[in-house]
Every structure is written in structure tokens, then in C-alpha cells.
Image: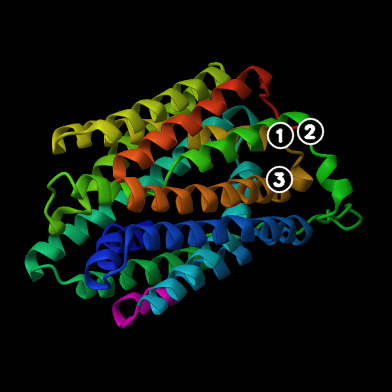
Amino acid sequence: MDVSSEMIHGLLPLYITGTMGAGAIAVGLIEGVAEATALIVKVFAGVVSDITGKRKLLALIGYGLAAITKPLFPLAQSLDVIIAARFIDRIGKGIRGAPRDALVADIAPKERLGEAYGLRQALDTVGAFIGPLIAVAVMLSSVDNFRLVFWIAVIPAASSVATLFFFVPEREAPPKGTSKPTLTLKAIKALPHAFWIVLSIGGLLSLARVSDAFLVLRVAGLGLPIAYAPLVLVAMNIIYALFAYPAGKLADTLSRPKLLAAGIIALIAADAVLAAAPSLGWGGAGLILWGLHMALTQGLLAAMVAANAPQEVRGTAFGLFNLASGLAMLLGNSAGGLLWDMAGGSATFIASGIAVTGCLALLPLLRETRETPV
């Protein structure tokens, strides 16, 4: 699914601002609403997965919705259809996200949570740079035919649903008599204090970290030809994929707060470089730092959520974590698009760098948690 999604997303910002004639604020709003929708839906999908134990079924529904929306992109004749397709696609992502993340923790040994989530992030990211490479090849061979790229993206999307359906077993339902979680204030308050610290840091990072769409716009603005625009995501995701698994393994042996601090510092550095970049070379350096930040933080945060949430409410915990991240992402991307239109791309990345420093103040409150609470 990542191959399919990134084939589209690597070109969508330029398609929206070029072919559709919309501004950067439209990109920011579309990306913010789309991603926030996905993360908010994860709350309810996580609760349902805890109650029923049907992790695979929910993931299958989510991946299926995403696959169904893919033909809408090449068929779209207006921005409204693009918005609708992105919205439905992200609903699908929201439905599958928390059950899938909880299933990883259900299966993986407790002492290897960091490694497990690092591997998941690495494999996700491999798809995320293969997709843009295919998009570049098609754009070059078809003389910038956006719609052809979008049609080809339908194939890997359908393949992902078939793979899940035929090759992934369903998790067994909770034993009879097991207490079933509900999304109540009491249940939410019962989650450990450490979980809420991790949630707060994740929310602040989502607020500060703008969508990949702005990376595409920023580097394209430094002189990158349109046909090569998907290479922005390729460059960033190669670094992400290379370092995600090693970073996950380190999270099982080294201090997780220190590793998280390194990831935050990498994002601050990426923002600074991208804000001041005078050329494509500097833009590439910013992408490397951005990918390093993603590798150091995303799998690590997932492992920290799993390590601080009891198994019976693990799906709910992932849902709440992603709700906070989704709301922050909506605000951050909307503000980023507005800043871009008012003051230029540099202002967006300067604001991101300033906002992310708040995460460093929360790090001293974190404690090491190696095993999932019972």
C-alpha cells in the first residue's frame, strides 16, 4: 500500500498547485485534514480491536477502503474529488492503523519491541521510496502524465489487500469472561502516567513536523524539475528505511529518552537547513536529516506506547496516541500552509524548528519502561 500511496503523494502537491491551480494553503489543509482524519479514526478502531480481538478484520477493512479510493485520483476532474479521495483513503488508514500496531505488540517478544517496530517502519518505508521511483520512471517515459501514474498505483494497492486477506491469520478473540475495555473517561484515566508523557511528546512532534507535501514543494522550489519531484520522497525514505531498524534495535538496549532526544535534534537541524537552503544540494542535506529524524522517533514512540500500555487496552492506547497526533497534525499543517502563502517556504520550516524544541522540555519526565504493564 505504501508503494501505491507514495506514487500518488509524491506528485499530488504539484498536481494540486499546478494542474488544479490551487495554492499551498490548499495543500496544507488537504494534508492536515486527511492525516488528522486517519489518526482520529484510530481511537475508535483501537477500542473495537481491544473488545473483539479482530485485529486482522479491521486492518482488512482499512486497507480495502484505501485501495477503493485509488482510481478516484486519475478520474478526478476537480479539487473536490481529490479532497474526497484523500479523506476516504485516510479513513481507511485510520481504521487499520491502531489494530495493526497493537497486533505487532501482541506478537513480538516484550524484550524486542523496539526491534519489532523498527522493522515495521523500515518495511513501510521501503515501499515509500519504491513508489516514488516508479512514479519518476513513468513521468519521464510519458512526458509528465500524472494520470497514468495514478492509474498504475491502483495495482499495488489491490495487491496489498489480497496479501492481507490470504496470508495474515486473524488474532483470536479475548477469552470468555475477560473484561472488555470501553472508551470511557475512567478507562482513559487508568492508563499509566508514562503513557501520557509519551503521548504529549508525540503530539508536539506532530504539531511541529509538517507534511511530506511541503518537503516536495520546498525542494521543487529550489530548481528540481517536476518529473523528478517524487525523488524528494525517495531520498528522505531511503534514509528512513536504512536507519529505522538499527534505531529500533538500539531502543531495546540504550536509553530511549536519549535516542528520542537525538531524533528531535535531527528534526531541528533539518528545519534549519531546509529554511536556509540556497540550492538543491542543501535541500538534499535537509532531506537526509529529516529521514534520520523519522527513523529515530517513529518506531521508538510506537515501542514506548506499547511498553506503557496494558495488553487489554493496547489498541485503545495506540488510538489515543494517534488522536493527539492527528489533532496536532491538523493544526500544524494548516498553519504551515498559511505561513507558506504569507511568508514563503522558509518561514514554515523556521516555525517547525521553533515548535519542536518544546519536546526537549518533556524528555526529563520520561522513565525507562522495558516491559508492558499488566
The answer to whether 290 is drawn above or below residue 155 in the figure is: above
Q: Residue at x 71, y 45 (%)?
A: 317
Residue denoted by label 1: 195
Residue 147 is left or right of residue 102, and the answer is left
Residue denoted by label 2: 192
Magenta range is 67-78
Q: Amino acid at mark 3?
A: Ala
**Quarter of the image that includes the N terminus:** bottom left
Q: Amino acid at mark 1?
A: Phe
Q: Position of residue 293 (x, y in %)?
A: 40, 31
Q: Is residue 75 magenta?
A: yes
Q: Amino acid at mark 2?
A: Pro
Name the image quarter holding residue 174. Answer: bottom right
Q: Residue at x 35, y 26 (%)?
A: 269
Kindly check if marks 3 and 1 are in contact, taking CB atoms under 8 A apart as contact. Answer: yes
Kindly check if marks 1 and 2 are in contact, taking CB atoms under 8 A apart as contact. Answer: yes
Which colour style is shown? rainbow
Q: Is residue 357 magenta?
A: no
Q: Which mark is residue 317?
A: 3
**Quarter of the image that includes the C terminus:** top right
Q: Residue at x 40, y 53 (%)?
A: 337
Of helix, strand and loop, which one carries label 1?
Answer: helix
Of helix, strand and loop, which one carries label 2?
Answer: loop
**Label 3 crowd bin: few (<14), some (14–19), many (20+), radius 10 Å:** many
